[in-house]
Image (cartoon, rainbow, N blue to C red):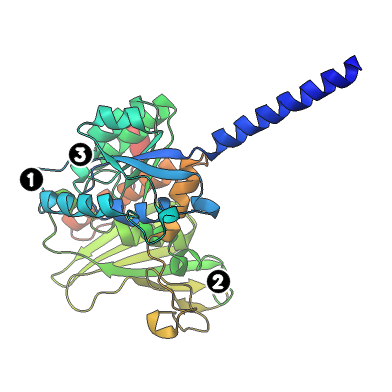
């Protein structure tokens, strides 16, 4: 009788423990946004805060934001006000009350934000602000995603990633182009095979704000690294004309990848991929991979041509905030910054071949 009583008490205790575990597991990872003038503050929150989120987006939610802007960045104040109004309304007052989500709280300082959240996304348009913002987050030990670019200079990028290592706080940054299926799917494309080379093309904004000038090619360079399978560039040449910015990168295994920055004429973000089985155009940003040379677009139909935009990167952010590894390593991020730095040096030397520096070791 005593043994049966003990067994019943034990079962009851275990039931209470499991119930508590379920309650704790139901609590989402609380995410905060630092700086909201970048449209990413809207684009990713729309996925992370979906009502009744399932799958990869379950268990993570944006709960707070600090709308700090930049006094000398064009339209920062305008976009901050615009996106704040959007965030305040997001998923509020639905037709079915069961579809409502808790409203996002707006705070007045970085410290207030950090007190309310478990992880942070930096979405300040002005990359010059990212180093100072990241330092506060990393010193607080909060997992951090930084919207492209991680910083506006190689020096700041190195400082951020070294502090992440010192504080043992995971941190990364990425363009949404990296996780667009029409690009990432080219690495294992059955009609291409092993990727031997790649020619990427995309826009090069001539009159971009000064804070963004160094990182102008970042969307397309991340596409290039995605299709080529990661880091390994040893040297770069760059030619600049009024119509085109042309960067050629040589990988250590002899493969060559190029970037054509379009300054004049029609702009599209895509690539031509060369493989050991065939040559194919890549998809375009936001859509899937081509089949027999046909690139899916909105005109292709509701199934093949569905635009997914930010969803690929949003899924990676969600997995990361729930404890997953950084999807883009510090080494790869810094190599891309070293490539951009080498391209600038090559351009200044009339297209001379410039070898990449190891930014981690030289700073």
The crowd level at tag 3 (other Cα within 10 Å; few <14, some 14-19, many 20+) is: many
Name the residue that disc number 3 marks: 129
The local secondary structure at tag 3 comes to: helix
Which disc number belongs to residue 189?
2
Labelled pair 1, 2 in contact (Cβ < 8 Å): no
Residue shown at the point (13%, 50%) measured from the top left:
76
Residue 363, located in which quarter of the rendered image? Answer: top left
User: Between marks 1 and 3, how big is the CA–CA gap?
Assistant: 11 Å
User: Between marks 1 and 2, how big is the CA–CA gap?
Assistant: 44 Å
Instruction: Give above or below for 335 relative to 279.
Output: above
Instruction: Give above or below for 110 relative to 346.
Output: above
Which disc number belongs to residue 72?
1
Residue 40, located in which quarter of the rendered image? Answer: bottom left
Residue shown at the point (46%, 44%) measured from the top left:
60
Q: x, y percentage for residue 227?
A: 46, 63
Chain-order first, disc 3 or disc 2: 3
The local secondary structure at tag 2 comes to: loop
Chain-order first, disc 1 or disc 3: 1
């Amino acid at each position: 009788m005593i043994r049966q009583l003990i067994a019943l008490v034990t079962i009851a205790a275990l039931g209470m423990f499991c119930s508590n575990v379920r309650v704790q597991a139901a609590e989402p990872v609380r995410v905060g946004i630092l700086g909201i003038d970048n449209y990413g503050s809207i684009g990713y929150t729309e996925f992370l805060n979906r009502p009744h989120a399932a799958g990869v987006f379950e268990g993570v939610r944006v709960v707070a934001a600090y709308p700090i802007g930049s006094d000398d960045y064009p339209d920062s104040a305008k976009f901050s006000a615009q996106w704040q109004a959007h965030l305040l309304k997001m998923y509020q007052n639905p037709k079915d009350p069961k579809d409502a989500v808790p409203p996002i709280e707006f705070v007045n300082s970085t410290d207030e934000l950090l007190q309310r959240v478990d992880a942070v996304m930096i979405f300040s348009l002005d990359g010059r602000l990212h180093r100072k913002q990241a330092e506060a987050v990393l010193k607080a030990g909060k997992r951090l995603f930084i919207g492209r670019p991680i910083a506006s200079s190689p020096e700041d990028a190195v400082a951020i990633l070294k502090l992440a290592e010192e504080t043992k706080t995971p941190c990364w940054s990425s363009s949404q182009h990296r996780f667009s299926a029409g690009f990432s799917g080219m690495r294992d494309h059955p009609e291409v095979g092993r990727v031997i080379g790649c020619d990427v093309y995309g826009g090069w904004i001539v009159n971009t704000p000064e804070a963004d000038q160094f990182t102008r090619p970042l969307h397309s360079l991340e596409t290039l690294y995605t299709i080529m399978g990661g880091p390994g560039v040893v040297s770069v040449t760059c030619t600049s004309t009024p119509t085109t910015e042309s960067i050629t990168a040589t990988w250590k295994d002899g493969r060559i990848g190029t970037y054509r920055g379009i300054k004049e004429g029609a702009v599209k973000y895509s690539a031509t991929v060369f493989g050991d089985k065939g040559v194919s155009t890549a998809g375009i940003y936001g859509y899937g991979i081509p089949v027999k040379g046909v690139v899916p677009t909105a005109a292709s139909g509701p199934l093949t041509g569905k635009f997914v935009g930010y969803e690929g990167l949003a899924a990676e952010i969600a997995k990361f905030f729930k404890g997953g590894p950084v999807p883009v390593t510090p080494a790869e991020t810094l190599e891309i910054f070293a490539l951009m730095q080498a391209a600038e040096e090559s351009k200044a030397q009339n297209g001379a071949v410039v070898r990449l520096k190891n930014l981690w070791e030289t700073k």
